[in-house]
Amino acid sequence: MKKFLILLMLLAVLTYSWGGAKKEEGGTVYLRMYYPVGVAGSLAQLMDGLVEEFNDSQDEVYVESIFAGGYMEAMDKAQTAFLAGNPPEIAVLDAPNLLTLMDIGAIIPLDDFIAEEGGDAFIGNFLEGFMKIARFDGKIWSIPWQRSTPIMYYNKDFYREAGLDPEKPASTWDELAEYAKKLTKTDASGNVERWGVLIPNDYWLTMPLLLQAGGVADNEPGTYIAIDTEEMRDVYRFLHKMAYEMKVTTGVTPWSQSVSDFATGKTAMLYHSTGALTYIRNSTKYDFGTAFLPKYKRQVVIEGGGNFFIFKTDERHQAAAWKMIKWMTQPENTAKWSVGSGYIPVRKEAIDLPEYKAFTEKWPQALVAYNQLIESDVERNMMTHRMQEVYDMLNVLDEKIRGSADLSIMDQALKEAQAEADKILAKWQ
Amino acid sequence: MAGTLRSRRYEKVKPYLYLLPAFFFLFVFTYYPIFRAVYISFFNWSTDYPVKVFNGIKNYLDVLENKVFWQVIRNTIVYSFSTIFLSMFLGLFLAVQVNKNVRGGGVFKVALFYPMMIPGAAAALIWLWMYVPTYGVLDHLLAGIGLRGLPWLNSTKTALWCIVAVGVWKHVGYYMILFLAGLNNIPGELDDAARVEGAGSWTRFWRVTFPLLSSYTFFIFIINIVDSLQSIDLVYIMTRGKPDNSTNLIVYYIYQQAFRYWNMGVGSTLTSMLTVFLLICVVVIFSTIGRRVYYEA
């Protein structure tokens, strides 16, 4: 009995210390922030470092930064934590999750905070291309943080080897296919040693292709997604031709694997996020460049990446969360984050800061995404209700069509996917 | 008098008292969640309906009508059958070989058991890298003997088998150890007697050793079924069900529905179906094969 009691006491002490670990001492507000790392590399350390700097800079708010996996896991965790009644106070999440977070009532609009900072004058400092996805129903729901566009990475050494001009990367779909043909290398037994181009299976990369082909992806209120269209067929015909007729690309390539494929020289060109820039820079021995995505009927690209969301807690915690977000998005901090990660600075002023200028002079590749955002059409990332489900479904569709050597399955697959999407969004249509 | 009566009564109650803590945890973490899942399965509870709405058996009908569900069931059956039979067959085979007093048998035992000690997540990551096409170890080896590389996890045709291979590799050592324990419990005289009667090694194994092992085989079979139906770690880390849902297994599918899409009603429906299916499995197996198992007195 005595032993049992001792055990019980030990347990009590343990639980107490566990719960007590998150101390809310004196006037300091304690916050938890979930954040994802969407691309390869050591961005987690960089993020933790910035948060630590914020904590040291003042003593009213203490933020614990919690690495939550990729974009997908971070959203899963935030959602589940909210469901369990214990949400984080702040989370960086894939920006199109906005509608889902709104639907479950997890987040608050930020307009009151923004008004206090000067309203439009304050928001005007952020790149407008990144603000589209933060707005809904006339309110602003999130603040841009780790933002990117897809860009094309290309290996200059391989360009030279194939007799192509390393300063003139493929700029149209036709050129892409033609260059990829020249850049693909196959050994005697038919093994492909190097692909011409890789476009990982992710709707975030399919959607720009769809827009370039003149298509429309979704509607403004996020209640419809266009799948069974002629433009979508154009995209898959093009990808199929490159994969199975010309054999210059793969049908299925996982998102994260493709980055190391490029860094190790297993592909000469790669469609990927600007966020992969630092990893590639640090791990490749090749001379590489970055370029706008090749155009087809239109020169267009989409934005992407994570925004800060404030979860519904109480006024004291919400105000503290805003304080932290405001600090993180100060021009010098967004510049620091961009220099370390390759993401585009979300504040216009950051571009002209000396430390960012020095960085882009040394690594002009980093400016490409920013220029693409300024110079070509930028459309909002896909955003619908029940986003996760729709997104997974689109990726499954992509793998199904591109994974098949026989393109005749396309019609049926697109039709079924459209019906499925309409069913998922039925409540909103 | 009263004292002995009380102590007798205490003696009667005592076993229940000992069982109570265990039952408490079973109730909180197993039985209550099961009942709760069954309850929720009759509701529409999702991001569309943040507040539960009674839905009758519609969730069940929707699930049964869903193409992906049937694909997941197919995948799970293929995965379970192949891992169960491959790992049991290999485990038994290896146990018999190691048991033959071979030189360095201990080394083999440790080497074969080793994968079991690697955490599932780490093992999955190691294999993920080995499976990378063109510059992964496996393609490298294939190229070394002049063969074409395979797409491994990147093709709907091969991905599931890649996961099966890792599952077998991971578990076979454990089953080998269990079989070894069984083999060591079989008195050598029985084998000797059979030998004297002129039985060959094949006959001796199937007529003497294997029947005496049946309680072990049965136990391994049961945990194998539960294990393989519940496996999620490999899929979660290696493929996320990709490509084209070809490696999506039932527990991962439940995770997707419940925690990724937040379709709690559908997730609970699937959970209830899996629980009932497992129960039926166990009952059927116990009442058929289970009756023929030989337990030493």
Image (cartoon, helix red, strand yellow):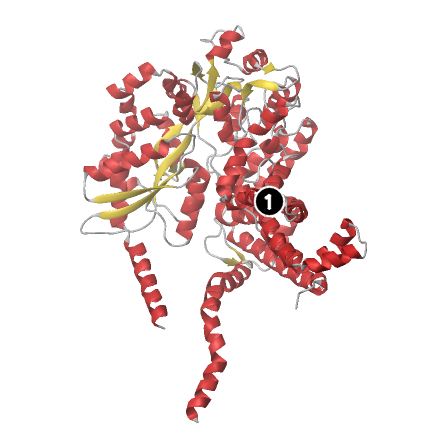
Identify residue type, mark 1: Gly
Q: Is residue B236 left or right of residue A308?
A: right
Q: Is residue A21 left or right of residue A400?
A: left
The residue sitting at 23% across, 52% down in the picture is A24
Which residue has dot 1 on it? B105
Label 1, secondary structure: give it.
Answer: helix
The picture quadrant where one finds residue A66 is top left
The number of callouts visible is: 1
Image spot of residue B125 (x, y percent) = 50, 37
Instruction: Please say if B55 is above or below A412.
Output: below
> In the depicted view, which residue is nearer to us: B77 or B121?
B121
**Residue located farthest toward the front when viewing the structure as drawn:** B196
Q: Is residue B118 left or right of residue A369?
A: right
Q: Is residue A223 visible?
A: no
The residue sitting at 45% across, 18% down in the picture is A292
Q: Label 1: how many residues lie within 10 Å, few (<14), some (14-19) or many (20+)?
A: some
Q: Is residue A149 left or right of residue A161?
A: left
Query: In the rendered image, which quarter contains the N terminus of chain A?
Result: bottom left
The residue sitting at 62% across, 61% down in the picture is B279
Image spot of residue A185 (x, y percent) = 59, 14
Image spot of residue A213 (x, y percent) = 55, 22
The picture quadrant where one finds residue A61 is top left
> In the depicted view, which residue is nearer to us: A299 or B282?
B282
The residue sitting at 44% across, 94% down in the picture is B1
Instruction: Please say if B12 is above or below A196.
Output: below
Image spot of residue B8 (x, y percent) = 48, 86
Q: Callout 1: residue from which chain? A: B
Q: Is residue A239 visible?
A: yes
**Residue located farthest toward the bottom when viewing the structure as drawn:** B1
